[in-house]
């Protein structure tokens, strides 16, 4: 895997080349000069240098309220030299300009030259999010690595038809290493409370019917847990700074990140506690 120094010591912005790495349904809104756009250009460069047989990325979520822990999460993630960081949402309490600027500053300071892509959380301000961070749904596609990450917006505790239609389209052309992410976890026999029901059954059926999907990522609950959903490994990662849950019937009350390593086309998962 390339080090951050391999990419650029100054993190210059490079134009997106002929290889389309970011496949998304864009509305009329332009996402130029957002974190998403800058990270996409950087991801293109890093992907050219990455080993197709062995690379990793990092998942974390719910970093609001504690800058020190979030900074530690970013520095810990950077130590693994990941292809990118996927943030599961709730980087803020209210999502205003000041909080968003602080989030971007922490990312730039503690994880320089690492692409960061953010899922829309329920604490974000959608207008500020789209203006500064990126689209509420997106698909990262890296053809050279056979990799795709599809992020959906269920920040209002429901997965509406527009999101399910988007996922269906993206899964119809999914490569062998595909992941799906959204902020709120589905209600299951294990996960109850702080979950969503509307659209959950449809999501489970779609995932079960898509052999390319190797993992699902959620946040929202301030803990770590691993389960199975639609026959696929599923994780809640909500321990990057937000106040941890007082008590829960499942999972671990721990500040953490998840390192996802893809080796020879198969994903493995490591929860790393922040100490």
Image (cartoon, rainbow, N blue to C red):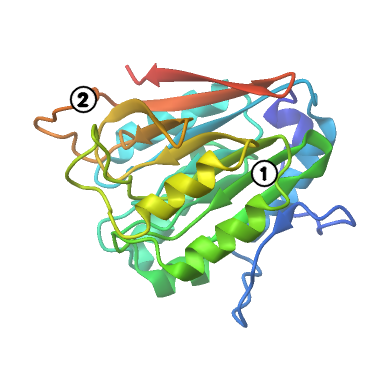
Q: Position of residue 167 (x, y in %)?
A: 56, 57
Is residue 247 toward the left or the right of residue 146 in the image?
A: left
Q: Which residue is mark 2?
A: 253
Q: Which residue is mark 1?
A: 148
- Kindly identify the residue that appears in the image at 49 percent across and 51 percent down: 118
Question: Marks 1/2: CA distance?
Answer: 30 Å
Q: Is residue 35 visible?
A: no
Q: Position of residue 128 (x, y in %)?
A: 42, 71
- Kindly identify the residue that appears in the image at 42 percent across and 58 percent down: 120
Q: Residue 50: which numbered mark, if any?
A: none
Q: Quadrant of the C terminus?
A: top left
Residue 142, image quadrant: top right
Q: Is residue 101 visible?
A: yes
Q: Quadrant of the N terminus?
A: top right
Most extreme residue toward the right is: 18
Q: Position of residue 146 (x, y in %)?
A: 77, 37
Q: Secondary structure at mark 2?
A: loop
Q: Position of residue 92 (x, y in %)?
A: 31, 55
């Amino acid at each position: 895997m390339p080090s951050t120094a391999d990419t650029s010591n100054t993190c210059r912005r490079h134009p997106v080349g002929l290889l389309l790495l970011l496949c998304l349904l864009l509305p009329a809104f332009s996402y130029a000069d957002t974190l998403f756009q800058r990270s996409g250009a950087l991801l293109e460069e890093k992907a050219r240098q990455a080993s197709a047989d062995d690379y990793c990325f990092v998942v974390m979520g719910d970093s609001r309220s504690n800058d020190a822990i979030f900074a530690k999460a970013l520095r810990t993630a950077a130590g693994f030299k990941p292809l990118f960081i996927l943030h599961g949402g709730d980087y803020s309490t209210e999502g205003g300009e000041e909080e968003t600027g602080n989030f971007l500053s922490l990312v730039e300071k503690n994880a320089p030259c690492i692409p960061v892509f953010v899922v829309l959380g329920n604490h974000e301000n959608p207008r500020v999010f789209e203006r500064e961070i990126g689209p509420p749904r997106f698909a990262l596609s890296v053809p050279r690595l056979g990799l795709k990450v599809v992020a959906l917006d269920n920040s209002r505790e429901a997965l509406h038809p527009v999101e399910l239609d988007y996922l269906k389209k993206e899964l119809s052309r999914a490569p062998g290493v595909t992941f799906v992410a959204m902020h709120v976890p589905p209600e299951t026999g294990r996960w109850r409370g702080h979950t969503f029901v509307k659209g959950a059954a449809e999501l489970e059926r779609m995932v079960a019917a898509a052999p390319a999907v190797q993992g699902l990522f959620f946040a929202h609950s301030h803990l770590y847990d691993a389960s199975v959903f639609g026959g696929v490994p599923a994780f809640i990662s909500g321990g990057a700074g937000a106040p941890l849950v007082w008590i829960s019937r499942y999972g671990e009350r721990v500040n953490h990140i998840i390192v996802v390593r893809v080796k020879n086309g198969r994903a493995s998962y490591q929860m790393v506690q922040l100490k």
